[in-house]
Amino acid sequence: MRGTAASPICCRSAAPPPSTPQRVSCPAAGAAAMSSRSHPRARHFSVSCFCRRRSEDLRDSLGWSPMEAVLRVLAGTAVSLSLISSSLSLPPVGMAVAAVQLPLDSPPAERCAWEEEQDPSSIERNPPPVITNEEIVKEAWEVVNESFLDSGNRGWSPEKWQQKRNDVLNSPIRTRSSAHDTVRKMLASLGDSYTRFLTPTEFSKMARYDLTGIGINLREIPDDTGVIRLKVLGIILDGPAYLAGVRQGDEILSVNGMDIRGKSSFEVSSLLQGPKETFVNLEVQHRDCRQVRSIKVKRQSVAQTPVFYRLEKMESGAAYIGYVQLKEFNALAKKDLVIAMKRLEDAGASSFVLDLRDNRGGLVQAGIEIAKLFLDKGQTVIYTVGRDPEVQRTIVAEKAPVFTSPLIILVNGQTASASEIVAAALHDNCKAVLVGDKTYGKGLIQSVFELHDGSGVAVTIGKYVTPNHMDINGNGIRPDFSRIPALSRVTQYMSQCRLSSKA
């Protein structure tokens, strides 16, 4: 199987064919990586992460060992993420995932001289290994065996899963279609609606998610001094960045003249975004040499702003309140939310309403970063829980809050995933009151692994737990009020919350 993974979460590749008995840890959160002897091509969507094998080992291009290829979407240690949103959907509601897309093919081998590239037609290529139908089933089985979290406590156990393997492989699987049907039935037996089989077409569609708008995914790599540097982990062949000369493994030094050392992949992805057909200027250092090159890249796509805001006068007429509606969590969510709230503050807003009703999620990393805008340094945003120790994470705010005014968050039954992370983080840390109806209850983490034939499996590998240690999934979050209370009641409620938390 081809493998790679994502975020606080770490995907592991499914077991390779018998001839290549090895296991690969995949990168997470915002990017993806590749590895394994059968040459992985890695893709990842995390809170969903993509795992994929390829013919250009990242160990060769970036110097990683298999265990170093770990992407961290949720913690922000991964790449352009952190996280995708719509491809894996909630049964009726869209799931929040960290997004990442890897190359459809590996770029040609390159020399230090930028203008020299080997003619692809001159490269000798080894024929791909023949993967049997049984091996496809075994790959899918291995993914579940290593990473699946039985979030619904339906009685899954390694022993029962081993018996399932024996049962499905007891008879010959004569066609690829039969192999896919076998995988479907095997996954359906888990009773988890989010763990499912993806046809090659479905997997390919999920992989075409571009967070930056120029066709690259970024990975955060600390240097010897601990400063974060960003390297191109994945690139879309024939995408804007590729056509302009950017290659996998290159380090991005600046965006439009701004030094990006120390910035997260999520922050830089926002800088790369812009109106379609406009240009962004990059300074890039090739992976194999010290030469720095200036590259002008034409943007081909851009996320639409998810923020709508207005200033409203309180009924008493003595104060103004800023109303901000956040429709989804995309690459522009944090930046545009900050702009909106600062403009409202300048216009006289002394308190805010953040409307997350019908917001089904999006990029989990965007939700995490937005929650941090309101939290004190050291306060917990969310916990992640899973079988793999790499999934066990506590995500906290690293800086002082940007906004401290009284905050009301509007929620309803369609408030899900990343929206629930924000609502729970601010509620449990006494930074906001919740008003409306109980939220949806989508708190699972999925990873998506590609199998050797281009199909894939989406597997639940973890779940989110609120700062007050409540399991979001299946439970949702209950609001404090059904209707918007008076501002005096809001401040009183938050004061009581802070006193209770100190007791």
Image (cartoon, rainbow, N blue to C red):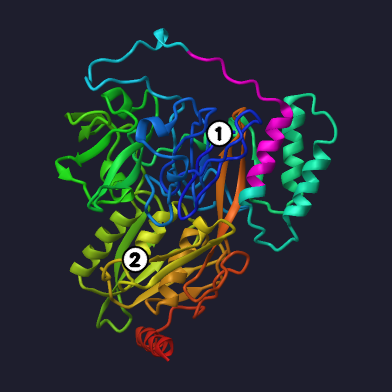
Q: Which residue is mark 2?
A: 372
Q: Quadrant of the image for the C terminus?
A: bottom left
Residue 5 magenta-highlighted: no
Residue drawn 22% across the image and 29% down it: 289
Image quarter of residue 413? bottom right
Residue drawn 63% across the image and 56% down it: 149
When the figure is inspected, residue 306 is found, relative to residue 143, above or below; the finding is below
* For marks 1 and 2 on the same chain, the one whose residue lies earlier in the sequence: 1
Image quarter of residue 486? bottom left
> Closer to the observer: label 1 or label 2?
1
Which residue type does callout 2 highlight? Lys
Q: Which residues are magenta?
A: 125-144
Residue drawn 81% across the image and 41% down it: 166
Which residue type does callout 1 highlight? Arg
Return the x and y of residue 3 as percentages of the image width and height.
Answer: 53, 37
State the separation of the CA atoms marked 1 and 2.
35 Å
Asked whether, in this view, residue 4 is left or right of residue 300, the answer is right
Q: Quadrant of the image for the N terminus?
A: top right
